[in-house]
Image: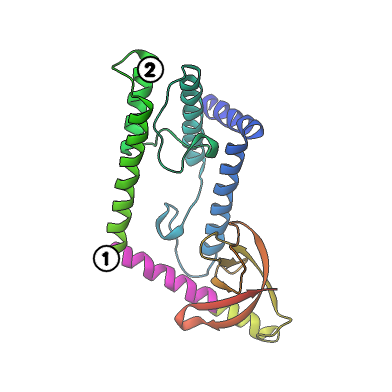
Amino acid sequence: GIAERNLLMWNRRHMQINEAAKKREKRLATREYISNEIKSAPGIQSRDDGVGGSFQRSRGHRMVDSALELYAFAVSTLMSKAKQPIPRAAGSGADRGGRLGTAPLRRYIDGIAQRQALSVLCNYGNPLSVKECRDATKVAARASDSIANIRSLKDDDSVQSQYISVNHRRQVSALHELSRHLASTGGINEKQHIQAISTGHNNHVVVIGVGATARCRGVKGTLKGGEKVIVQVIDINPEKGVLDVKLV
């Protein structure tokens, strides 16, 4: 429709002139690419809602994403012109193309941001000071950290265990396929090189075309997310879901 077309046109233009928006799009595209590679493991049905590292941007996702991007840009611009602060979630500053809302609105910090925008732009209540905005950001960050810690301690959570199991089955399936490929082309040796892409987390990479996740050994520093590399297999154990590689 017209709304979708205008949103996508604005989004494309925004990425051309805004470096933060361009970097954010690159991060999302990399995440989607890696997710699709992991999903390529045969015989395992995958989700697309963010659970277990899954990620997909459908037509609807892109429309909502563009709308939130436009809203954040418009409110940030108006607040800047009014020379007034606005609270943001930690790590989502304007320099990263950070959002000021979600769909549906569910974060405490986003609710405070809407309150501040209404106060400044619509004379609805008293605006927050710079200190109050900073305090709101700190409170929200502490709450997010606490929630993350609680989730990490729930090892017996049946739903989480279910998706860990699915991820393991997917890894095992992918490693069996990779093992067959290696066996048909001479086995593990120094000349056996394969393409992979970095996940951006703990120097893990995903083997392109197979979907297996590997630990990249002997890396100096950290591999950047989305970086394509050539690796050599050091160790592979399909039944345990273990794959170790090193950079070539």
- Residue linked to disc 1: 158
Depth check: give the residue in front, 159 or 81: 81
The answer to whether residue 11 of the structure is visible from this angle is yes
Residue 248 lies within the magenta run: no
Instruction: Give the residue at the far top of this rendering.
Output: 123
- Residue linked to disc 2: 120
Depth check: give the residue in front, 83 or 97: 83
Q: Of the two numbered discs 1 and 2 on the same chain, state the one appearing first in sequence.
A: 2
Q: Specify whether 75 is left or right of 122.
A: right
The answer to whether residue 105 of the structure is visible from this angle is no
What's under tag 2, amino acid-wise? Val
Q: Quadrant of residue 14?
A: top right
What's under tag 1, amino acid-wise? Ser
Q: Quadrant of residue 140?
A: top left
Residue at x-position 55% and y-position 64%? 40
The boundaries of the magenta stretch are 155-175
Percent coordinates x, y for residue 137 in the rendering = 36, 38
Q: Residues within 10 Å of mark 1 (few under 14, many from 20)?
A: few
Percent coordinates x, y for residue 119 in the rendering = 34, 18
